Amino acid sequence: METKNNALRVIISGGGTGGHIFPAVSIANAIKELRPDAEVLFVGAEGRMEMQRVPDAGYRIIGLPVAGFDRKRLWKNFAVLIKLVRSQWKARRILKEFKPQVAVGVGGYASGPTLKMAGAMGIPTLIQEQNSYAGVTNKLLARKAGKICVAYEGMEKFFPADKIIMTGNPVRQNLLAGKQTREEAILSFGFNPEKKTILILGGSLGARTINRTLVAALDTIRAQGDVQFIWQTGKIYIQQVKDAITTVTGEAIRNTQVPGIPNLYVTDFIKDMASAYTAADLVISRAGAGSISEFCLLRKPVILVPSPNVAEDHQTKNALALVNKDAAIYVKDADAMERLVPVALETVTDTGRLEALSNNIAKLALPDSAIIIAREVLKLIDKL
């Protein structure tokens, strides 16, 4: 691994989900914008989506053999511990060869061993904590971190107050550059601009409860004359959803438009999220920190259905941080089958409620997060 001795070198570590990868790439882009001479190397987890998405964004990445702990089947964690030790040794080797002046952790499996070894080697570190509830790894890493960038108030519960800076979470830059009108965006999905539109996001992989709830409500969806639905199922659930729709309509789905349910657009992945957000009068989503930051910046009324299958139930805490300011609607995962669709239909037709949600969530937006974080990264280098 060749490096130029006089070049600015930054390691960014983490990933696992789009919610970690998109902010990481945004930070890298911002560093390059401020310092075009910078070399940025990513460190991810082998087999995870960052190993494809980061090179797609134009950056080099090296994978560690790290894996997450199995909280339900503890006996399986012996192999995880071995992978963790191997990952720390590999991270140390990467750091010695690349010689970064700073290491940035964005969360995800790989950030733990990378930032731990960087701290042990005296390399300045910066943590970007995306959630309103800090995980165990970041709380441990915070002891040696030079700066901790957060997106929620009250993070002094988890981190030293003098290290915290409120930056918000970086979002995908292409979402903010859209010039489309709402009418153009809705027409791009083959829908009627005069009707209300609900966007359902299952995430890049999929949200089982949200998808099952929508499958159970297909007859209700078909009966809506004035509401149309853009449904991203995630790649894991697309075939199950298509089979369920075929059972209801008696017709096979060959593309995104649904025969027999003309007010439904279904896909596993939406490439043009800017258009999808512009088209949406209301969004249904899990409560990942990255998604919430996007909703805030785009002023989107949202119903949050937090995933119960995440560490420390942090998605519920993310959601409640908004709900307590009347900036989002909360439907518990266990109640979704009964409540989600009725609440969505009631909300999307209530213009006053949509406007209030939009105004309140906009107050929580923190723009320019990536540039602010990039400046903090450069400050840590300047201190050297």
Image (spheres, grey):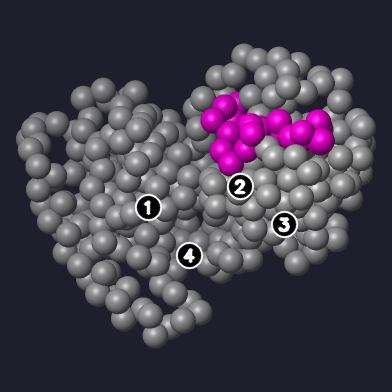
Residue 226 appears left or right of 240: right
Mark earlier in primary sequence (3, 4):
4
The quadrant of the rendering that contains the C terminus is top left
**Which residue corresponds to the image point at 80% horizontal and 48% vertical from the top-left?**
248
The residue labelled by disc 3 is 212
Number of marks: 4
Q: Nearer the viewer, mark 4 or mark 1?
A: 1
Q: Is 272 within the magenta?
A: yes
**Residue at mark 4 to residue at mark 1: CA–CA distance:** 20 Å
Confirm whether residue 119 shows in the render: no
Q: Which element is circle 4 on?
A: loop
Q: Quadrant for residue 53, please give it.
A: top left
**Which residue corresponds to the image point at 50% horizontal and 62% vertical from the top-left?**
134
**Residue at mark 1 to residue at mark 3: CA–CA distance:** 25 Å
Image marks 2 and 4: residues in contact by CB distance under 8 Å: no
Query: Relative to residue 34, is residue 204 depicted above or below?
Result: below
Image marks 2 and 1: residues in contact by CB distance under 8 Å: no
Q: What secondary structure predominates along the stretch shown in magenta?
A: loop
The residue labelled by disc 1 is 48
Query: Relative to residue 300, is residue 183 depicted above or below?
Result: above
Mark earlier in primary sequence (2, 1):
1
Q: Quadrant for residue 293, please give it.
A: top right
The quadrant of the rendering that contains the N terminus is top left
The residue labelled by disc 4 is 135
Query: What is the three-letter code of the residue carrying label 2?
Result: Ile
Residue 318 percent across, percent down from the top left: 63, 55
